[in-house]
Amino acid sequence: MKVIDLTHFISEDMPVYPGTEGPKLSPANTYEKDGFKETLMIMYTHTGTHMDPPAHLFPGRTTLDQFSAEQFIGTALVIDCTDLSDGQRVPLAHITRYGQKAEEADFLLFCFGWDRYWGTPAYFGDYPYLSDEAVEFIISRRKKGVGLDVIGIDPIADEHLTIHRRLFTRNEIVVIENLTNLDKVGDELFWFMALPLKHVDADGSPVRAIAFWP
């Protein structure tokens, strides 16, 4: 089986969304004192490579723990958007040029090449984002999820989270943010898995996202 890891490492010095505290990793037990090692991990549910459900924005909507596990696995297609300029919106043609593959994929993953800025101030810059037509394509095809290699599916300056709201208002869909290595996957359909932690009332969760070919 071939596997490509699409997940960033969690560390205390990792990028986090502006206004959010970074994770804390503290020794809780040590080999010397306790005979084993254990770490106390404190972090927000939307840290690193993570997943948003509709309940992230709307009370009473679906939390991650309410989805069946089938929601988090399926076929995927990487949409190459590395030709776009900073702040440019993804035109529908960038999706439809993949033809039937874009129709069949359960997940569309947008590669802006922005993961190259991970760990630098540029990561919070003016990255490209989805056009209204691209969002409507995702909604109308009832995709399981959409993923990106940027800090958020909305522009960093959009405090209203317009795209999140359009996706989550009536749809059972998840959003995976802060992916990496999308440029290594190719332009054919592949299997994708992004499994969140199974905690109660989950408004979000870090995930281990992978591309794989059985």
Image (cartoon, rainbow, N blue to C red):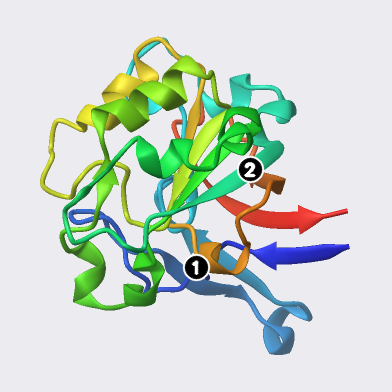
Alpha-carbon neighbours of circle 2 within 10 Å: few (<14), some, or many (≥20)?
A: many
Horizontal and vertical percent position of residue 101:
63, 37
Give amino acid for label 2: Ala
* Rendering quarter of residue 29: bottom right
**Is the Cβ of the residue at disc 2 closer than 8 Å to that at disc 1?**
no
**Residue nearer the viewer, 203 or 114:** 114
Horizontal and vertical percent position of residue 145:
53, 33
Report the residue marked by disc 1: 10
* Rendering quarter of residue 153: top left
Horizontal and vertical percent position of residue 63:
51, 23
Residue drawn at (73%, 78%) of the image? 34
Q: Nearer the viewer, mark 2 or mark 1?
A: 2
Give the left or right position of residue 128, taking residue 7 as reference. left
Q: Describe the element under mark 2 as helix, strand or loop.
A: strand
Give the left or right position of residue 201, taking residue 47 as reference. right
Residue drawn at (37%, 56%) of the image? 81
Give amino acid for label 1: Ile
**Residue nearer the viewer, 34 or 127:** 127
Report the residue marked by disc 2: 76
The relative height of residue 111 versus residue 139 in the rendered view (above or below) is: below
